Image (cartoon, rainbow, N blue to C red):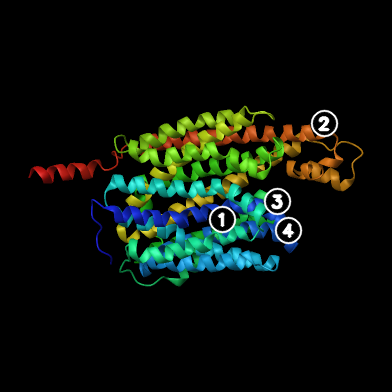
Amino acid sequence: MGAEPSSRPGWRPWAGLAVLALPTVLLGLDVTALYLVVPSLAVDLHPTATETLWIMDAYGFLIAGFLITMGTLGDRIGRRRLLMIGMAAFGAASVLAAFAPSALWLIAARALLGVAGATLMPSTLSLISNMFADARQRASAIGVWATMFALGMAAGPVVGGVLTAHFWWGAVFLIAVPISVVVLVAAPALLPEYRSDAPRLDLRSVALSLAAMLPIIYAIKHVATHGIDAQALAAVLLGGGSTVAFLRRQLRLREPLLDIRLFTDRAFSSALSVLLIGLVGFGGAMYLVTQYLQLVEGLSPLAAGLWMGPPAVAMLIGGIGAPLIAGRVSPGIVMAATLALSLIGYVLLAFAGTDSKPTVVAGFAFVYLGLGVIAALGTDIVVSAAPSTRSGSAAALSETVQELGIAAGVALLGSLTTAIYRTAVEAPPGLSRSVAESYSDSLSGAMSVRDQLPVAALHRAQDAFTSGLNTAAIVAGIAVAGAAIVCFRMLRHIGPIGAADHEEETIASTS
């Protein structure tokens, strides 16, 4: 087991945090950078529609599926060791993706990237909990960590657009290579090692966790694209049955893969609930806002990415500023107040029209502000509630909930918007069958055949999508209001961050 960190860290932990920020930003970039790369790689690899979907989804699909396993594995073999193994694997898989000669090769490389990414996310977060024993400094460090991931997501479209414009689509993946080298060189010098004395992984639990997570994630993504059908229901039933079997096994084991007893802590379970609800709203809003900017406002992908700059600044303010305020005020109160403030964003989105670019961007900035605060403080509450021997597992569970929230937000709010669109539009007479089907399916479908549509029909399609965005914002706003109430009622008992540590130091200094 690693040595206990000093309660007053010097420069080394902060330098280590800078090292951990690199893979964190990289993970965020890989989530969104591919949005602008697909048209270019399609020219070279000629993927089918199904292959294109798997190129996009394989990464997040396997990250979510392996997070719990990798978080617990890091507790056992060493969190720094797992980080370095994952970083080397991520760099190698990125090279395979960059020079993929076929769509199936790229899908396999993206899947490997997802498995490697699942080692990085809990490793970076659990190492932070070991490096910073002081509660206030740990909260600030987690705020930086959460902000770096969100900034990576925000920067993804811009970086992808610039690299694709000046090089080729594979250059987007090669960003990981120099970052991997820097982390592998710096980690042994700046990051502590920490492992628990628990026995080896229970492989049956690992199998059950994958059988639980992968079908559920698949069902969520399937619903987002195809709606609710027999395939989605079968996946939910398989995942639900495996979840029950997984939980029953964890309750019987002395050293479980996931310690279910953590959920008996009110702060732990409430913070996870708030993270889930908040990420559902954010995931759906980001998915719809990026489409609005490109399909309704007519911006290029690069220009749309630049318009996402102000929301990214709001996220930065929330993620870094919230822990400072929570040093004086209960983090539950800070989260509740900020979520209430983010409701302004959902109201702005609910009243946006087809020519409301500043309103939509301002609304999403408020949404992003709320995300920054709950990602920083909520994650800190979750990790702090777990014993040090289980911080990797707790970090992985926090990340799993957030991955589920984003996927569910895209599926639920995206499906709601699509349903409203299909109800509101009707193909004008005189169109070919294929054009009429594309027009009636979605706004992106309508834009793909825009040259064959009357101008009035195209405007009706944009109006219908915007109405769907308005309704989705109302639904998300109601859910976020509920999350604010949960924060106020269930988390306000938590004292300001570091208050207990400060009292102990005062008693010690006067004795």
Task: Mark 3 or mark 2: name the one nearer the start of the chain.
Answer: 3
Task: Mark 4 or mark 1: name the one nearer the start of the chain.
Answer: 1
For the N terminus, give its image quadrant.
bottom left
Residue at 67 percent across and 52 percent down: it is 165
The secondary element bearing badge 2 is classed as: helix
Task: Mark 3 or mark 1: name the one nearer the start of the chain.
Answer: 1
Task: Mark 1 or mark 2: name the one nearer the start of the chain.
Answer: 1
Total numbered labels placed on residues in the image? 4
The answer to whether residue 423 is above or below residue 64 is: above
Does residue 115 appear left or right of residue 392 in this picture? right
Q: Which residue is situated farthest in the front direction here? A: 166
Question: Residue 13 location in percent, x, y?
Answer: 31, 55
Mark 2 or mark 4, whichever is nearer to me = 4
Residue at mark 4 to residue at mark 3: CA–CA distance: 21 Å
Q: Is there CB contact under 8 Å for labels 4 and 1?
A: no
Q: Which residue is situated farthest in the right direction here? A: 430
Residue at 92 percent across and 39 percent down: it is 430
Name the disc covering residue 456, or none: 2
Q: Residues within 10 Å of mark 3 (few under 14, many from 20)?
A: few
Amino acid found under the numbered disc labelled 3: His
Does residue 403 appear left or right of residue 423 in this picture? left
- Residue named by callout 1: 30
Name the disc covering residue 395, or none: none
User: Is 201 or 338 nearer to us in this picture?
Assistant: 338
